[in-house]
Amino acid sequence: MENNEEGLINRERELNSLLEAVRKLDDNRGKSFIISGEAGTGKSYLIEHLKQRDELKGIDWLEGVCITREGVPFQPFKEAFKKKTDPKSTEGSKHISFSLISYKQEKGVNLFDSSKPDTIRESITTIRKMAEEKPILVVIEELHWADKSTLLAFRYISERIKDMPMILIGTYRPEESVDFDLLDDTIHHLGQREKAEKMELGPFDLEETKEKVNSIVSDTFSDHFIETLHNKTRGNPLFITETIKSLKEKYHSSPESHPENITPEDWPSTVEYVVKRKILKLDKKTRNLLQYASVLGERFEYGILSKFVRMNEMELLDCLDEAIVKGILKEVEGGREETYRFTNSAIRDVLYISQSKNKKKLLHKRAAKLITSLNIDDLGDYRFDLARHLENIDARNEAAKNYLIVGEMAYKNGDHWKAIKMFNKVKQLGKELKDFDGVWEDYANILYDFGCSLDEGHEKKIDCLKEAFDVFKRLGKDTSMNDCKNALKDLEKDNLYKEN
Ligand SMILES: Nc1ncnc2c1ncn2[C@@H]1O[C@H](COP(=O)(O)OP(=O)(O)O)[C@@H](O)[C@H]1O
Ligand SMILES: [Mg+2]
């Protein structure tokens, strides 16, 4: 397959909308757009694709970026129009520069001169003239950093753009905004009066994720891998791109590290950086709280959290609120009490990893203690958490015991997959057969039953039966051992299995 890393995935509707506006410039009709989306959803990428289109050839493309809220007034607009107002600018065509000099000489107009009270109004008169000579497309990126004057100019132009051959595009990241008020107000105002078209860029779905992966590497990956990747990145195009690029480097230099199993440590630093910036924007208390919460897991209950962090209740609620507003946590319905979860497991992983080893250990210890002291008969889901915490403080024996209980419960409830997974955990912890007398026979029985129940040809069928055979053999259970052998022989007859 031909790899096309530069291809634009999914944003057809948005691109068409923008191109339609470009076409209308010929009739002297202009339009404003506001594109929103979290970091990495492809706002700049979409604009870059628009810029490359043939339709944009006769149009002056101007760009500015908002840098700080307390910066020079109108700084991004000044930057954008510099190409046209600076006669020395090599980029601006001679014709335009010349006409601007004449605007200046005739009217004494300086675009966005903050020392003049009427500067926005005057500037727009000049811009209108420029646009009538040659249509203009202005992009103002990162509006969440815009100062008041820039937002006012954006609004003022948007309200008058309809009969000007000009397009104005603003982008912003909702989660970056510290003080939403003015930006919110501007966007709301423009939206209500249909002065600007709002576009929200969302995450990729599974198909789009797959498409993006295939545009970077031609290797085929299992559906399971794509699902994990999608889940880990929450479909964020940047996360997907960076993850695949870094994995590609890794396994191309050492093929045995094929990325079918992404672990938190595999997250490339760029993704970590994107997430870290998001986290750094938070109030310090919220950040600390989230780090603690990351130890509890991808989801956690309010009651446990409040005991775990020992914070003043109002403060805790405020922090949780901030985390929700910033898109880091979500409330989950249907738990036995209020439950929260991280919107993105990459965010949880980064929060978790960014703590010292020692701190994590202490926190796991505290969490284990807390769960043990809960004093409820049926630990239920907490049991698995408990096992995980114990594992993290190297209490292997205790951890294994709890995984085992989770496994047996799962078996009783008919969840064989989970049961086998839990037993495997126990084995990973290095528990010898003799350590859990009696239990292993259960395990082998589950494996046998389960193996028999799977369809012929199921990849796990043979694994289960073989493993059951091994365990029965070590336990000296001859009858059961023979049952396994016969089941495997049947498969052999059908050429599905070859004993070696
Ligand atoms: N529609 C898309 N199709 C393919 N790749 C995309 C798309 N959107 C984003 N990407 C990938 O994600 C990266 C980050 O996008 P970017 O435009 O920088 O995000 P934003 O400006 O919203 O923060 C891009 O460099 C590109 O690799
Ligand atoms: Mg961008």
Image (cartoon, rainbow, N blue to C red):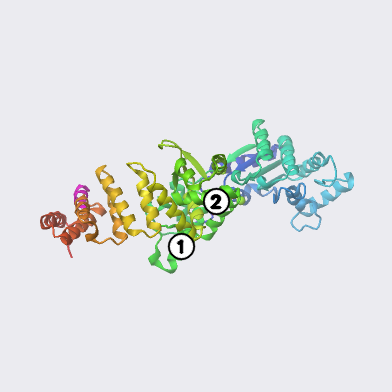
Magenta region: 447-454
Q: Quadrant of the C terminus?
A: bottom left
| Residue 113 highlighted magenta (yes or no) | no
Residue 212 visible in the current orientation:
yes
Q: In the rendered structure, which disc, 1 or 2, sits on the residue that comes first in sequence?
A: 1
| Residue 453 highlighted magenta (yes or no) | yes
* In the foreground, 12 or 123: 123
Numbered label attached to residue 248: 1
Tell whether 334 sits left or right of 94: left
Q: Secondary structure at mark 1?
A: helix
Tell whether 197 sits left or right of 419: right
Numbered label attached to residue 380: none
* In the foreground, 133 or 435: 435
Residue 109 picture quarter? top right
Up/down of 130 relative to 364, above or below: above
Mark 2 CB in 8 Å range of ligand 1? no
* In the foreground, 317 or 248: 317
Residue plotted at (64% across, 41% down):
34
Residue plotted at (46% across, 56% down):
362
Q: Quadrant of the N terminus?
A: bottom left
* In the foreground, 235 or 165: 235
Nearer the observer, disc 1 or disc 2?
A: 2
Q: What kind of residue is marked 2? A: Asn
Residue corresponding to mark 2: 288
Q: Main secondary structure of the magenta part?
A: helix
Residue 82, percent from left and from top: 77, 52
User: Are circles 1 and 2 on residues that touch, CB within 8 Å?
Assistant: no
Residue 255 picture quarter? bottom left
